Image: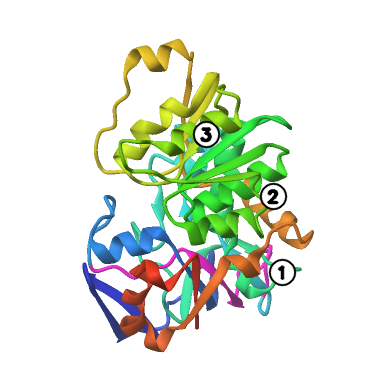
């Protein structure tokens, strides 16, 4: 089968590998769509902290079942999506129903080879039917579930003010589910094209252009639209240390700060600022089965503008040559899908 391998940072190669042999508990999937995630871009550029090369990337996966164990929830011919966080089911997190932060987690495409290939064998516990949505939509469930999970961590009430810092795909997913929760959603980002998507198809209430100068007009605008009270919940989806540290100033007194992005370094806050707000500081990692189901239900109900999110489609055969182009901001990529 055809397989695209990231051999080292900046180097993708097409290779032939045997079709995997499915074990007695595995579902063999003919991969049809792979979403390109920020994680994949970080792997390609050498900025992913949990990875060893070479690696087959790809964890946003949709396909058709080739074979499945007797009694599995899926059968040959079913369209499916994959929950790529292979949790152990035994550790303290798994016992608490939080397989998303399993002590022994193996994420497809990061800790173990993923789905940028024609076939993949996955334990049946992590394969789900994708009835009622297209394969393109099914490949977008995972990144949207990350946003849904982050929103569930803050649990905003209808009418509360929410700020999303960073309008990449994950930030947009957060904005979508904060809006569905009834919050008033503002988005802060340095790219006007992405803010336009947030203001248009995603129906954010306010968008604010990042000001990296000392004038900090963005902070003044965020103060203005909240009458100086700022936000009940702030979500960072930037993956930028300075932004993560700065975001605390936008949390209202008594509010919550959710770090959705991750960096391979330390972040710090001024303790008086953290304490005077009685800030609830939360991390959000991956997503749960319930988050995936929430996304699927919202898709089926037509509540997610998936067509606006899927800006680019690539072919597996040409991926090594085309992939670097996704890094160019001028390309306007939100979510690229690889068709297999």
On screen, residue 247 above or below 119: above
Q: Nearer the viewer, residue 83 or 229?
A: 229
Measuring 52% from the left and 68% from the top, which residue is drawn there?
61
Residue 291 sits above or below residue 227 on the image = below
- CA–CA distance between discs 1 and 3? 37 Å
Residue located beneath label 3 in the image: 222
Residue 17 part of the magenta segment: no
Closest to the observer, 125 or 245? 245
Residue 298 in view: yes
Q: Quadrant of residue 183?
A: top right
Closer to the camera: disc 2 or disc 3? Answer: 3
Asked which quadrant contains residue 155, the reply is top right
The mark lying in front, picked from 1 and 3, is 3
Q: x, y percentage for residue 40?
A: 36, 64
Q: Which residues are magenta?
A: 54-75
Q: Residue furthest left?
A: 8
* 11 left or right of 219 in image: left
> Residue extending furthest right?
301
Q: Main SS of the magenta segment?
A: loop
Residue nearest the observer in this picture, 281 or 235: 235
Q: How many marks?
A: 3
Q: Position of residue 340 (x, y in %)?
A: 50, 83
């Amino acid at each position: 089968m055809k397989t695209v391998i990231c051999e080292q940072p900046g180097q993708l190669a097409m290779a032939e590998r045997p079709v995997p042999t499915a074990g007695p508990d595995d579902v063999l999937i003919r991969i049809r769509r792979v979403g390109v995630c920020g994680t994949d871009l970080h792997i390609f550029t050498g900025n992913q902290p949990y990875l060893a090369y070479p690696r087959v990337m790809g964890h946003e996966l949709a396909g058709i079942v080739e074979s499945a164990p007797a009694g599995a929830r899926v059968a040959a011919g079913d369209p499916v999506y994959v929950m790529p966080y292979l949790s152990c089911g035994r550790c303290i997190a798994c016992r608490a129903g939080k397989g998303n932060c399993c002590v022994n987690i193996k994420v497809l495409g990061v800790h173990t080879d993923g789905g940028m290939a024609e076939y993949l064998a996955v334990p049946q516990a992590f394969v789900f039917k994708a009835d009622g949505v297209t394969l393109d939509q099914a490949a977008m469930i995972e990144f949207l579930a990350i946003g849904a999970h982050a929103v569930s961590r803050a649990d905003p009430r209808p009418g509360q003010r929410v700020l999303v810092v960073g309008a990449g795909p994950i930030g947009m997913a957060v904005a979508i589910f904060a809006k569905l929760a009834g919050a008033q959603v503002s988005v802060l980002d340095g790219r006007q094209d992405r803010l336009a998507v947030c203001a248009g198809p995603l129906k954010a209430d306010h968008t604010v252009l990042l000001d990296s100068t000392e004038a900090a007009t963005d902070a003044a605008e965020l103060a203005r639209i909240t009458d100086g009270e700022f936000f009940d919940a702030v979500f960072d989806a930037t993956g930028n240390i300075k932004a993560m540290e700065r975001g605390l100033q936008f949390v209202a007194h008594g509010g919550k700060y959710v770090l959705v992005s991750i960096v391979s370094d330390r972040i710090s806050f001024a303790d008086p600022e953290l304490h005077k707000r009685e800030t609830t500081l939360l991390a959000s990692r991956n997503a749960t089965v319930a988050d995936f189901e929430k996304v699927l239900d919202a898709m089926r109900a037509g509540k997610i503008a998936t067509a606006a999110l899927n800006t680019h489609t690539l072919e597996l055969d040409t991926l090594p040559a085309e992939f670097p182009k996704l890094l160019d901001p001028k390309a306007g990529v939100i979510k690229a899908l690889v068709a297999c």
